Amino acid sequence: MNQVSETNYQDRVYQAYAEPLTPAPVPSISSSAVLVSLSRSVPKMTKIDKQVTAEVTSAKHASKSAGKFQKKLLNCSVLDALHTLSGQIYSYHIENTVAWTDRGPRLLPNEKLIDYKNTVEAFFVEADLLWEDFLRVYPSRVASAQLNHVGDMFNESDYPTVEELRRKFRMAVSYEPIPDAGDFRVDIGNQAAQEMADTYTTLLQDRVRAAMGDVMERLTAPLVNMSKMLDYHEGEKATGFRDTLVDNVTAIVDLLRTCNLTNDPHITSVQKQLRATLTGVTPDGLRRDPTLRANTKRDVDSIIKNLPSLGF
C-alpha cells in the first residue's frame, strides 16, 4: 500500500491556503461565530530557593548560571487536582475553538456556543469547589510542609495568607462579537472611514483564511496518522495502533463541520466523505477485518489527496 507523505501533504495545504480567498463569504462571519477568551490563574505554589541554589552549585563546583533549585512549597493532592483540571479546561478550549489572532481571543462557531458555554461553566463550578477545598486545608498543608515536606528549606515568607491566596485564583471566559467591515462609524471623514473598512476587510479575509487553515492543519495529523497505522497486512503486528485512532479523526470532522465559516461546499463535501468513511468503523473492527482496514485506508488516502483542491 502507498504511504502518504505528511510533509508533502502539508506543503500542498499551505500552498492552497496561500491563494486569495474567494470574495463573498466574509460578511457572514460576524453572524456565524463569536470570539471567546479564556483566562485561568491557579497559584503554582513553587519558589526558587536562592540559598539552596547557591549551596548546590557550590557543592558541585558549578557556576551560578548552571541551574536553579525550585522547591514545591506544598504537598497537596487537592491543589494537584486543580492544576490538572485547569489543564483540561485549556485543552477543551483549544480543541473546540479555532485560532483567530496570534494571541488572544479564539473563534467559536455559533453552533458550538451553547455546548461550549455549558461545558466551561461546569468546569468552573468544579474548579471553584476544588479551590475552596484547597483554602480549607491550606493551613494544615503549610504546617505539614514545615514539619516534613520542605524541612530546613521552610521559609514562612514563601507562604501567602489565605486572604492573599483568594486573590490569586481566577477562572473566567468572555465572549465578543466579530465586527463587520461596515462597523467603522467614527466621524473621521468618509475617505478615512472607507480606507479603514477596506483595511479591516483584508484583515478579516486573512483571519478567515488562517482560521480555516488551522482547522485543516488539525485534520492533517490524525488523517495521515490513521493512514499510516492502517498500512499493515494480515499477520503483521500493528505498531502504535491506539483505540483513539478513529476518535481523533472524528473529533476534527465535527469541528470541520461547525467551523465551515464560509459555507464552502467543498469543505462540506470533505466532511461528509469523512463522516461516511468512519460511520460504523471501530478500532477493534479495523484490527480484526483486513478488508475494512484496506477500504478505510483507501478512502482516507483519497480524501487526503483531494484536500488541497479546495482552492482557498
Image (cartoon, helix red, strand yellow):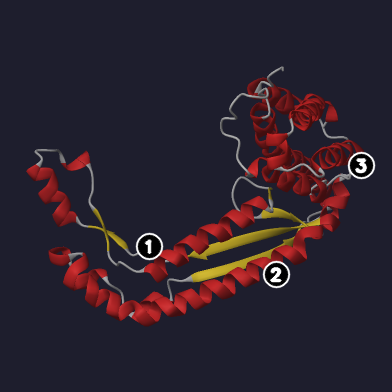
Residue under the point 41% across and 64% down: 80
* Residue in the picture at 9% in, 38% down: 61
Residue position marked by numbered label 3 in the rendering = 24
Q: CA distance from mark 1 to mark 2?
A: 27 Å
Would you say residue 311 is visible in this rendering?
no
Quadrant hosting residue 115: bottom right
Is residue 212 positioned above or below 84 on the image? above
Question: Mark 3 or mark 1, which is nearer to you?
Answer: 1
Structural distance between the alpha carbons of marks 3 and 1: 48 Å
Residue occupying image coordinates x 82% and y 47%: 257
Q: Where residue 304 sits: x, y (%)? A: 77, 28
Neighbourhood count class around disc 3 (C-alpha, 10 Å): few under 14, some 14–19, many 20 upward: few
Instruction: Using the image as rendered, state which of residue 47 and residue 22 is in the foreground.
Output: 47
Asked whether disc 1 touches disc 2, contact meaning CB atoms under 8 Å apart, the reply is no
Quickly name the residue at label 2. 118
- Mark nearest the camera among 1 and 2 is 2
Mark 2 secondary-structure assignment = helix
Q: Position of residue 117 (x, y in %)?
A: 70, 67
The reply to whether residue 245 is visible in this rendering is yes
Nearest to the eye among marks 3 and 2: give it: 2
Q: Amino acid at mark 1?
A: Lys
Q: Nearer the viewer, residue 109 or 252?
A: 252
Residue in front for this viewpoint, 190 or 125: 125
Quadrant housing residue 293: top right
Under circle 1, the secondary element is loop
Q: Residues within 10 Å of mark 2 (few under 14, many from 20)?
A: few
Q: What residue is shown with label 1?
A: 44
Residue 216 pos. (x, y %) = 73, 37
Residue type at mark 3 is: Ala
Give the answer, above or below, for where 38 lies relative to 279: below
